[in-house]
Amino acid sequence: MPGKLRLGVNIDHVATVRNARGGTHPDPIRAALVAKAAGADGITAHLREDRRHIRDGDIGRIMREVDLPLNFEMAATDEMIALVLENKPHAACLVPEKREEVTTEGGLDAAGLHNQLKTPIAEMSDAGARVSLFIEADERQLEAAKSLGAPVVELHTGTYCEAHEAGDADEVAKQLDRLRKGAEICESLGIECHMGHGLSFETVKPIAAIPQVMELNIGHFLIGEAIFLGLDGGIREMRRLMDEARA
């Protein structure tokens, strides 16, 4: 029987709404506190180069004011690595980042960037951060993560979610099979498996039912659903669906 599946709530898009008008409202740290009360196990925040949502000050406030582990999403740049070494978050998740993209478009090429990633991963690990890599459920990428010494990977679920939205049942089945096999490879390599990107009430249960998955990171859908259910209500419903699938 698999154990409890952790839920990490990404608060980026609370900051997106704040930044659209300026000022301090709505406050992403307040959202993190609501997430904790609603059953979240951790907080995820992506500090981008262009600071389009989360800002530097938000990271410090999360560390000081929210009694939950922070999963700090970041590109593998000198600037971001220095911030990890300064703030010492629980986890540092390396993601690909392009200034022109609306959202993260796919997994990090851990195999192709092996030589560039080796030293930063070692530095952040030595500083106490649990380094994870946001990658595709691909054996070559998973073996690269193992070689790099990353104890955790987060497998990209975006393609699966897009297939579900398009109503393509064959592609949904194909992508689910790929994610299940990726989780099995993680287990064989001794890497902790997380998943995330694009998950919703409609898509979460088949992912949550994969026994090797230890954590899901969900953000945009929950912040959007908060308009209709409230943030507390949306997180509690996601938590319920995850627990039901895992049981």
Image (cartoon, grey):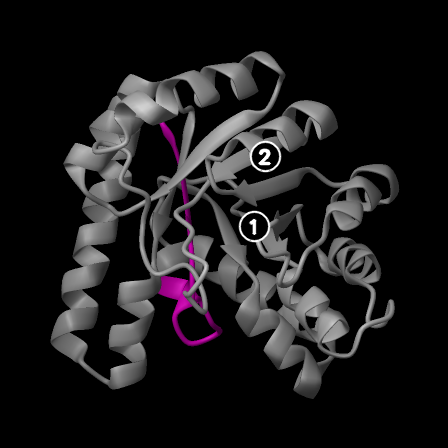
Label 1 CA crowd tier, 10 Å (few <14, some 14–19, many 20+): some
At horizontal 52% and vertical 16% (from top left) the residue drawn is 123
Amino acid type of the residue that numbered disc 1 sits on in the rendered structure: Glu
Residue drawn at the location 65% of the way across and 66% of the way down:
235
Based on the picture, tell me whether residue 118 belongs to the magenta stretch: no
* Distance CA(mark 1)–CA(mark 2): 9 Å
Q: Is residue 196 magenta?
A: yes
Circle 2: element type:
helix
In the displayed structure, 185 sits above or below 165; it is: above
Categorize mark 2 by other alpha carbons within 10 Å: few (<14), some (14-19), many (20+): few
**Where does residue 8 sit, x and y in percent of width and height?**
59, 50
In the rendered view, tell whether residue 24 sits above or below residue 124. below
Query: Image height check: is 119 above or below 143?
Result: above
Is 206 situated left or right of 48 in this image?
Answer: left
The span shown in magenta is: 191-206
Question: Which residue is label 2 attached to?
Answer: 79
The number of numbered badges drawn on the structure is: 2
Callout 1 touching callout 2 (CB < 8 Å): yes
* Left or right of residue 80, residue 105 in this image: left
Residue 103 picture location, percent across and down? 45, 65
**Disc 1 target residue:** 49
- Write down the quadrant of residue 109 in the picture: top left
Measuring from the top left, give residue 218's x and y in whole percent.
Answer: 53, 60
Q: Secondary structure at mark 1?
A: loop
Q: Residue at x 25, y 51 (%)?
A: 179
Viewer-closest of 65 and 77 = 77
